[in-house]
Amino acid sequence: MTFEPHSPRELRAQVKYYFSCTHHHIERQDEHNAARNATKLAHFGLRLLEHPEIQLEFAKAHAAEEAAAKQKTVEEYEKAVAEADAAVVARLTASQEEHNETQVDEGITN
């Protein structure tokens, strides 16, 4: 009876093992054994990717990436609003200063 891995840990171990074997056979130019081990590597790699625990990890990572992207978007929006506010304040300040200079030039005082 052959050992059939089921947990993500066992599957990762098989993937690492067959990756190492495949690499070894490629270095020795043993195409037959490299192909045989690459097939097993693909088999265990696919089983690992399809494992429910790994799928959950992928889902969590994807959710975290989306949250980070949304946060970045919020930060960019807040930065753009702050820059727009600063530009409006600068224009109002310049306009007020220009208005004050005009009043001084015309001799108008408060």
Image (cartoon, helix red, strand yellow):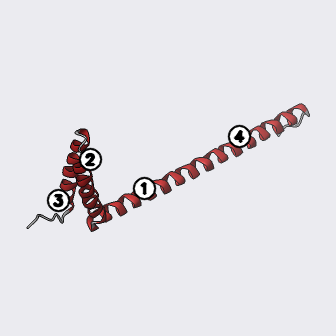
**Residue lying furthest right:** 106
> Dot 2, how many residues are within 10 Å of its Cα: few (below 14), some (14-19), or many (20+)?
few
Report the mark closest to the observer, 1 or 4: 1
Judging depth in this view, the residue of 99 and 85 nearest the camera is 85
* 3D distance between C-alphas at marks 1 and 4: 37 Å
Q: Position of residue 108 (x, y in %)?
A: 88, 37
According to the picture, the residue beneath numbered tag 3 turns out to be 10
Q: Which labelled disc corresponds to residue 27? A: none
> Dot 4, how many residues are within 10 Å of its Cα: few (below 14), some (14-19), or many (20+)?
few
Say what amino acid the circle numbered 2 marks: Glu
> Dot 3, how many residues are within 10 Å of its Cα: few (below 14), some (14-19), or many (20+)?
some
Q: Earlier in the sequence, mark 4 or mark 3?
A: 3
Q: Position of residue 41 (x, y in %)?
A: 25, 55
Residue at left offset 20%, top offset 47%: 21
Q: Which labelled disc corresponds to residue 31? A: 2
* 3D distance between C-alphas at marks 2 and 3: 26 Å
Looking at the image, residue 82 sits to the left or right of residue 11; the answer is: right
User: For residue 44, what is the image quadrant?
Assistant: bottom left
Say what amino acid the circle numbered 1 marks: Glu
Report the mark closest to the observer, 4 or 2: 2
According to the picture, the residue beneath numbered tag 4 turns out to be 90
